[in-house]
Amino acid sequence: MGVPMIRLLLAEDMHLIRKALIALLSCEDDIEVVADTAQGEEIVRLACLRRPDVALVDIGMPGIDGLTAAAELRRRLPACKTVILTGLGTPLALRRALDAGVRGFVVKDAQPAHLIDCIRRVHRGERVVDPELAAAVLDADANPLTARELDILETAAAGATVGEIAERLSLSPGTVRNYLSRILTKTGARSRVEAIQIASESGWLWPAREIGILRYRPRR
């Protein structure tokens, strides 16, 4: 018997990168790209339609980000294993990926051979994470903020007012102010700006400058 074929879905919003990846992966005898998309909201729909074994997903997709899509894939199509492709080689990105049930985590400047090996190993049931990045997660300072407080602070970091934060996260302005007050207490900050700086330097906040546009969705 030959090597089993890996059916792969590719989600990458940058056209040139997506086409280059399709060309790269199509050169492998055991990998077939059965679907590709530039839109985050298409990932789960295409996966349910094409039934891939592995989904290779960019973390910063428009519409629905890659991690939200990965979590939904785990719920809707557990047989499909997700590999995150990202420029965010940070402990925070990895922690969120693992929380979303991702099985592989590859940074965009990795060697092509490493990406292909990761896809094959994830298909075999392994979890593939760079050892140094995994160690950085374990060594990272403990984050005192809850998931909701991080949502609040990330939205504030993008320049949103209290009213805008409330609207984006479906909260009342008073609730947002209460959260901000608790954030200041937990971080020891004297202002919202200082709290954002502390959280950013500690690696607790999503780096907006690298992911592009943050998409704020309440975590369940």
Image (cartoon, helix red, strand yellow):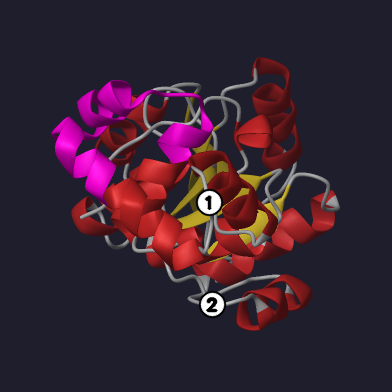
The residue sitting at 57% across, 30% down in the picture is 12
Dividing the picture into quarters, in which one does residue 155 lie? top left
Dividing the picture into quarters, in which one does residue 170 lie? top left
Residue with the most extreme top position: 15
The residue closer to the viewer here, 187 or 55, is 187
- For label 2, count other residues whose C-alpha is less than 10 Å away and answer few (under 14), some (14-19) or many (20+): few
The location of residue 72, given as percent across then percent down, is: 27, 49
Which part of the image, by quadrant, shows the C terminus?
bottom left
The residue closer to the viewer here, 176 or 70, is 176
- For label 1, count other residues whose C-alpha is less than 10 Å away and answer few (under 14), some (14-19) or many (20+): few
**Circle on res. 190:** 1
Residue where numbered disc 2 is placed? 142
The residue sitting at 53% across, 25% down in the picture is 213
The location of residue 62, given as percent across then percent down, is: 46, 23
The residue sitting at 25% across, 54% down in the picture is 77
The location of residue 175, given as percent across then percent down, is: 17, 43
Magenta-drawn segment: 154-178
